[in-house]
Image: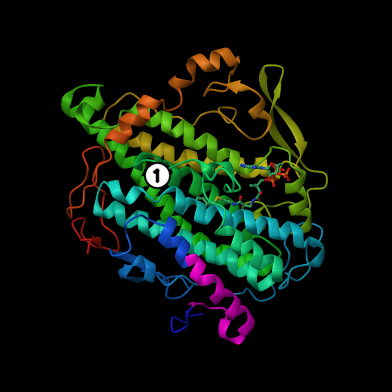
């Protein structure tokens, strides 16, 4: 399954065998390139960036690193290898051969899932477009750009499915991906977290930790799909996603580490005085990014999600490894809900609670990363613990969007919320402080004062390697 880089659009799907599809995608390509030039990373076109490019979809296919100017990055179409004899693994069609073509009766639902997924990818590039101007190091700048080009490729992945399987409406949807823009008043991105700005690097690291992790869980559920081309493309996308979450986890970890170093070196809690980000501010950013990211899982009880499952279009996380009937007709699942002014746990149909189950899987995974940050704090001998807020905190979607709650899940009045939310979410002042730290550091090996250096370089290169060359 090696990738053909001789083609205008690199691919491992024998694109040249399907002239119509090839022509349609080649027609979409200039619009994509124009979008990248206008809304991709600012002032980056002339830079040589040390990027990885997939050379095959097999394990180890990531070995190819070299300097690339981003507008010349070889975005293409890569699907994981087909599994022979793959079946639909859940829902009403369980046991049928996986579909190679869109099942006609589920066309609208499948298109909607693919469009929602696809829309997030260019959105994140738009959200992050100014960050390069204030990079804390060349290492970080290179990682930002790696994330950006791969999100661009994820858009290609979804656009390929739309073009290859949805005819004219698919082509129209592919156009619309370049017309909606993050934060645009008239044509916003579909999901709210993708209309929030990513104004500084602490936000970027939080975003890649929390929001990219939603990507991991959504892609993993779509990778279970009975629609085989979607499954195969998501499986390959997941291999790219892992690096993005690494950037988030280590990025926040390095900000935490620097805060602890300052506290110990100067024997103070006043980390800001010495140009670091204090732990309480990191906690507020965590609260914000966690809460907007858990919204991305949708309503706790969702007939949409139940239908996607029964139709065999979107499964649960690691569906095939779960030991049950994969139909969920009679099963129940515990779901937190509001009763009066209390959060209580009740049993609900497992089928309608699919979104909530995925959210639970996600929260457990987030906790693992937060535990690592807490280890850094503990090892520095500091008495402070970062905490994931309760799922009822600061929600815009689902049952909890109706109420106000503290980070530990107590329901409070609107008036109380108005009075106290600045203790839990970044205030204007917090944001202004974090913004004031954002100054570009572009000398190889040097790192801004608010973040610790990375533990090691990329692809075995030293930390002082020139990861980005300015021309
Ligand atoms: N914002 O029945 P419900 C990634 C709407 S991130 C706005 O719960 P459903 C990435 C919903 O559309 C992963 N609206 O909805 C990360 C529905 O509208 P209608 C992206 C929302 O469908 C970083 C209504 O509320 N992938 O890859 O079960 C960088 C009822 O809701 C939101 C996917 O999301 C919201 N947050 O669940 C780059 C996978 N939530 O029908 C990339 C595909 C709900 O009443 N998407 N609504 O008009 C899905 O599976 C589902 O669409 C969702 C929503 C899980 C998002």
Q: Position of residue 7 (x, y in %)?
A: 47, 83
Residue in the image at 55% along x and 13% along y: 416
Residue 359 appears left or right of 112: left
Magenta stretch: dominant SS?
helix
Residue 406 appears left or right of 206: right
Q: Quadrant of the C terminus?
A: bottom left
Magenta residue span? 9-32
Is residue 416 positioned above or below 310 on the image? above
Residue at the extreme bottom of the image, as rendered: 17
Residue in the image at 67% along x and 43% along y: 355
Q: Which element type, helix, strand or loop, lies under badge 1?
A: helix
Q: Is residue 10 magenta?
A: yes
Q: Is residue 403 magenta?
A: no
Please name the colour scheme applied to the rendered image.
rainbow
Residue 178 appears left or right of 86: left
Q: Position of residue 231 (x, y in %)?
A: 63, 65
Q: Position of residue 63 (x, y in %)?
A: 36, 71
Instruction: Please tell me in which quadrant of the rendered image residue 167 appears.
Output: bottom right
Is residue 358 positioned above or below 284 on the image? below
Residue at the extreme front of the image, as rendered: 186
Does mark 1's beta carbon lie closer than 8 Å to ligand 1? no
Label 1: how many residues lie within 10 Å, few (<14), some (14-19) or many (20+)? many
Residue in the image at 57% along x and 47% along y: 188
Q: Position of residue 465 (x, y in %)?
A: 20, 60
Q: In the rendered image, is residue 307 in sight?
A: yes
Is residue 264 positioned above or below 331 on the image? above
Residue that numbered label 1 is attached to: 204
- State the residue in front, 238 or 420: 420
Q: In the rendered image, is residue 219 in sight?
A: no
């Amino acid at each position: 399954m090696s990738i053909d880089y001789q083609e205008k659009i690199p691919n491992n799907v024998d694109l040249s065998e399907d002239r119509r599809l090839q022509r349609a995608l080649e027609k979409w390509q200039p619009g994509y390139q124009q979008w990248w030039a206008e809304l991709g990373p600012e002032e980056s076109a002339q830079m040589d960036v040390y990027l990885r490019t997939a050379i095959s979809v097999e394990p180890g296919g990531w070995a190819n690193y070299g300097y690339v100017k981003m507008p010349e990055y070889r975005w293409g179409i890569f699907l994981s290898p087909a599994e022979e004899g793959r079946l639909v693994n859940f829902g009403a069609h369980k046991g049928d051969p996986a579909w190679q073509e869109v099942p006609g009766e589920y066309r609208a639902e499948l298109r909607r899932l693919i469009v929602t997924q696809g829309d997030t990818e260019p959105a994140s590039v738009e959200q992050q477009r100014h960050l390069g101007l204030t990079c804390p190091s060349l290492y970080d700048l290179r990682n930002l750009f790696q994330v950006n080009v791969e999100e661009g490729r994820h858009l290609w992945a979804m656009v390929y499915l739309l073009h290859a399987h949805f005819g004219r409406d698919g082509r129209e949807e592919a156009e619309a991906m370049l017309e909606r823009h993050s934060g645009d008043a008239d044509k916003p991105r579909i999901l709210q977290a993708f209309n929030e700005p990513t104004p500084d690097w602490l936000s970027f690291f939080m975003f890649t930790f929390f929001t990219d992790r939603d990507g991991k869980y959504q892609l993993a559920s779509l990778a279970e799909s009975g629609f085989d081309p979607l499954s195969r493309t998501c499986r390959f996308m997941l291999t790219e996603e892992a690096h993005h979450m690494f950037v988030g986890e280590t990025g926040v970890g390095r900000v935490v580490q620097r805060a602890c170093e300052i506290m110990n070196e100067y024997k103070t809690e006043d980390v800001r005085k010495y140009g670091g980000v204090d732990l309480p501010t990191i906690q507020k950013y965590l609260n914000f990014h966690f809460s907007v990211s858990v919204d991305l899982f949708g309503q706790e009880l969702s007939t949409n999600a139940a239908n996607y499952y029964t139709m065999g279009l979107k499964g649960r996380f690691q569906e095939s490894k779960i030991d049950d009937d994969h139909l969920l007709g009679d099963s129940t699942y515990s779901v937190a809900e509001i009763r009066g002014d209390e959060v209580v746990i009740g049993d609900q149909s497992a089928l309608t609670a699919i979104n909530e189950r995925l959210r639970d899987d996600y929260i457990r995974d987030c906790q693992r990363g937060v535990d690592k940050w807490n280890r850094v704090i503990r090892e520095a001998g500091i008495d402070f613990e970062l905490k994931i807020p309760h799922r009822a905190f600061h929600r815009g979607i689902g049952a909890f969007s109706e109420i106000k709650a503290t980070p530990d899940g107590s329901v409070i009045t609107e008036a109380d919320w108005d009075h106290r939310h600045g203790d839990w979410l970044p205030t204007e002042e917090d944001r202004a402080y974090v913004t004031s730290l954002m100054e570009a550091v572009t000398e190889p090996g040097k790192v801004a004062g608010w973040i610790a250096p990375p533990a090691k370089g990329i692809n075995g290169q030293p930390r002082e390697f020139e990861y980005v060359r300015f021309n």
